[in-house]
């Protein structure tokens, strides 16, 4: 068997975005030895790309704001499917987490009286997003990296070793979680560690650790048009599933309304909602501000009905209602989709986003410097002089690992999750700005949960050598010619091979790039922004075919930086995650948030209290068998409904009965204090 580098830690954090770094800081501050592993360079994560800001009810710009208003907005945005306890913790704790960042050294934009400035965003009643121009995520991540360096300096002063309690393993991908023996047939074993590989050398790395925090971000790379970068292949979702955890809400995928549509090479790149928050408006090819035609019944009364009122609102929120350009993202994305479909789109299949006619050029450059440069350099468009062309792009996954809201622990003992890879917080649709605050609130809680878990352990589960061998074989399997795989041969010694990097072709096996392109196109076309039963069923059929072909993926060359091999491993995760999305999308026969069924338009109150749970198929469940046993390479998933716990009464009382009646069944509202029926 191939050589494996070994390390031992108390807590292993997989992912170095905002959630992972905040978790690592917390666990380290509790005195534990922590490793942070990330697939890309340290500092390069989606968090760094977050532009608009971090939502927290600090009330700096409008002192009517409070955690209760933020909680209400979040639940409305998620169409009341959110895990209400998570939404409550998030709304209450976000301001402290932003202030804490200032203590770490973050420099937010200020109001004229010197407080942290907050900007408008879709679905937020008051200006709430703390921001640094349109580069907020960069500042957030830079600050936490700085905090990590400070902790390492403390460790150096005490022990002479900067990495004594906190070490970063960058450009290292985790491929498998390892667990100890299970106590009961239906109970997964406790976390014992994880196996990964250095992307540059291809050498395998084993981490022994009794607690793992997954903070691996999203799944966007399963879709063709996406704002996500190459890392976002649903690894954490798939790792958790394979270890025995559950995923929830996987049908809810957010298509951000404004991605670039032209030129083709940059299609999908995000255009921040901050453009609309700061005054930009959407127009169709007739020059009409069409969003006034798309205010759904559940939001009637909350949004301006005329352009004059909408424009006045930017300066006077007390006496005017918000512009419908700032409806929640799912509503705006669907509206753009309809305008384009009905022939009122822009030349390249989007609509127009106009800020040029709304404020002076210098003001645009000051407020939105990244957007100015992005369009100038990538599309040769000067946004201070002409409108942008924009259209929906796959952006964020609401679904994720099912965790306990207070500790972030999954059903696998010792396995925690936070950030985009965790599910529940955002319900069926996330409000912009609520992700950065989610990362801070639940990253901290997961780090704390992991530290408490480790402190309470009597004994750490051992990593079992047979499991390490199996995980290593799986990781190296794409180097084996498909014909040799049944015999259990592995590509363990592929490192010695010479030749070009990349994928094998022809009869030798499947090419990972071809399969990836097919998967992305199919998910975009059949399980994208608008879904129907027949299309999703067709997607499932094609996923079945891809499953067979993914098993045949073959890569040539050696293990030193071999992108074909990396993609082959990612494909395994993308396929399982796509199956979870498609199966959940087929079962939910209603339209809610980031799940639109053309054949079931509208909300169905009977679906509001039900979440869809994805788990590994058990014996006896449809698709639970693979040649008489569970398939270790691509285990099958099964999806079924579960009841969402009813909202606590004091939280329910924060809403008017009349509003809840739009979402809830009558029997659910019996407990509402306003209900006299
Ligand atoms: P990420 O920041 O995505 O980090 C994931 C980490 O996991 C990375 O370090 C990655 O390398 C690592 N990783 C993944 N798989 C593996 C593996 N197998 N092994 C090892 N490491 C792995 N949200 C807002 O609230 N406000 C905004 O203004 C905003 N703007 C956005 C703009 C863009 C362009 C995008 C793409 C997103 C935006 N979002 C915004 C969403 C938000 O940025 C993300 O949801 C959030 O940053 C996710 O953070 P995270 O910590 O969960 O993961």
Image (cartoon, rainbow, N blue to C red):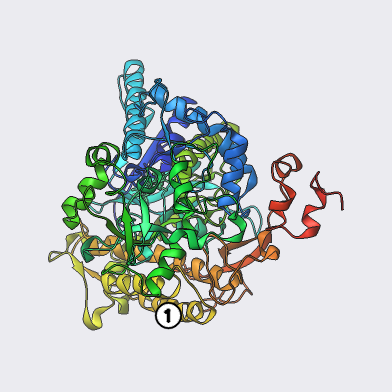
Q: State the residue at coordinates (64%, 52%).
A: 183
Q: State the residue at coordinates (49%, 73%).
A: 531
Question: Where does the image place residue 104, in percent across and percent down from the top left?
Answer: 38, 24
Question: Where does the image place residue 577, in percent across and percent down from the top left?
Answer: 46, 64
Q: Is residue 627 above or below residue 367?
A: below
Residue lying furthest left: 499
Residue lying furthest top: 157
Q: Provide the secondary structure element on which disc 1 rests.
A: helix
Question: Where does the image place residue 363, in percent across and percent down from the top left?
Answer: 27, 37
Q: State the residue at coordinates (36%, 21%).
A: 155
Answer with left or right where residue 443 lies relative to residue 15.
right
Whether residue 457 is visible to the viewer of this picture, yes or no, is no
User: Which residue is more in the foreground, 337 or 584?
Assistant: 337
Question: Where does the image place residue 427, in percent across and percent down from the top left?
Answer: 57, 53
User: Which residue is more in the foreground, 451 or 282?
Assistant: 282
User: Which residue is more in the foreground, 484 or 499?
Assistant: 499
Q: Is residue 10 above or below residue 466?
A: above
Residue behind label 1 places its C-beta within 8 angstroms of ligand 1: no
Q: What residue is disc 1 on? A: 542
Answer with left or right where residue 27 lies relative to residue 38.
right
Q: Quadrant of the N terminus?
A: bottom left
Residue lying furthest right: 677
Q: Residues within 10 Å of mark 1 (few under 14, many from 20)?
A: some
């Amino acid at each position: 068997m191939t050589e494996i580098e070994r390390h031992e830690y108390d807590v292993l954090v997989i992912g170095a975005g905002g959630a992972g770094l905040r978790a690592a800081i917390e666990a380290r501050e509790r005195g534990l030895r922590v490793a942070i592993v990330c697939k890309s360079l340290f500092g390069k994560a989606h968090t760094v790309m977050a532009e608009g800001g971090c939502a927290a009810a600090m009330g700096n710009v409008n002192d009517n704001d409070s955690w209760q208003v933020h909680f209400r907005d979040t639940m409305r945005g998620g169409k009341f499917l959110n895990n209400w306890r998570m939404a409550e913790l998030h709304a209450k704790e976000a301001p402290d987490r932003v202030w804490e960042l200032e203590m770490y050294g973050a420099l937010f934009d200020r109001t004229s009286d010197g407080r942290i400035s907050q900007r408008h965003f879709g679905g937020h009643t008051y200006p709430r997003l703390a921001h640094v121009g349109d580069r907020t995520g960069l500042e957030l991540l830079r600050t936490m990296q700085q905090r990590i360096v400070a902790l390492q300096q403390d460790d150096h002063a005490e022990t002479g070793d900067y990495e004594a309690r906190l070490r970063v393993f960058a450009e290292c991908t985790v491929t498998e979680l390892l667990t100890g023996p299970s106590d009961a047939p239906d109970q997964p074993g406790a976390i014992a560690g994880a196996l990964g590989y250095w992307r540059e050398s291809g050498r395998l790395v084993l981490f022994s650790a009794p607690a793992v925090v997954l903070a691996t971000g999203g799944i966007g790379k399963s879709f063709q048009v996406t704002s996500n970068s190459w890392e976002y292949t649903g690894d954490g979702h798939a790792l958790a599933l394979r270890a025995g955890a559950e995923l929830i809400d996987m049908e809810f995928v957010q298509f951000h309304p404004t991605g670039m549509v032209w030129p083709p090479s940059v299609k999908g790149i995000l255009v921040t909602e901050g453009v609309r928050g700061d005054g930009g408006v959407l127009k169709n090819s007739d020059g009409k501000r069409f969003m006034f035609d798309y205010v759904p019944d559940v939001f009637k009364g909350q949004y301006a009905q005329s352009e004059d009122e909408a424009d006045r609102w930017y300066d006077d929120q007390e006496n005017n209602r918000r512009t419908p350009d700032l409806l929640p993202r799912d509503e705006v994305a669907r509206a753009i989709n309809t305008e384009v479909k009905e022939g009122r789109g822009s030349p390249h299949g989007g609509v127009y986003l106009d800020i040029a006619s709304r404020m002076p050029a210098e003001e645009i450059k000051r407020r939105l410097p990244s957007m100015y440069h992005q369009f100038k350099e990538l599309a040769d468009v000067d946004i201070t002089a002409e409108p942008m062309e924009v259209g929906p792009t796959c952006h964020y996954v609401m679904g994720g690992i099912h965790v306990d809201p207070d500790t972030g622990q999954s059903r696998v003992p010792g396995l925690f999750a936070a950030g985009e890879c965790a599910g529940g917080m955002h319900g069926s649709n996330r409000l912009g700005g609520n992700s950065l605050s989610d990362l801070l609130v639940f990253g901290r809680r997961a780090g704390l949960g992991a530290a408490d878990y480790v402190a309470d352990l009597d004994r750490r589960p051992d990593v079992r050598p047979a499991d390490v061998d199996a995980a290593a074989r799986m990781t190296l399997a794409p180097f084996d010619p498909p014909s040799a795989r049944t015999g259990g041969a592995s590509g363990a010694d592929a490192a010695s091979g010479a030749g070009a990097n990349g994928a094998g072709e022809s009869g030798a096996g499947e090419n990972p790039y071809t399969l990836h392109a097919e998967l992305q196109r199919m998910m975009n076309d059949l399980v994208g922004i608008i879904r129907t039963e027949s299309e999703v069923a067709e997607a499932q059929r094609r996923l079945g075919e891809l499953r067979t072909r993914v098993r045949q993926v073959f890569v040539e060359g050696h293990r030193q930086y071999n992108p074909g091999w990396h993609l082959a491993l990612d494909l395994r995760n993308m396929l399982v995650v796509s199956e979870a999305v498609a199966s959940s999308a087929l079962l939910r026969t209603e339209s809610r948030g980031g799940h639109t069924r053309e054949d079931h338009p509208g909300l169905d109150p009977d679906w509001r209290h039900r979440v869809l749970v994805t788990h590994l198929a058990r014996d006896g469940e449809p698709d639970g068998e693979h040649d008489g046993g569970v398939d270790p390479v691509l285990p099958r998933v099964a999806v079924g409904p579960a009841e969402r716990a009813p909202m606590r009464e004091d939280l329910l009382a924060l809403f008017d009965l009349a509003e809840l009646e739009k979402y809830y069944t009558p029997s659910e509202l019996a407990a509402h204090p306003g209900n006299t029926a």
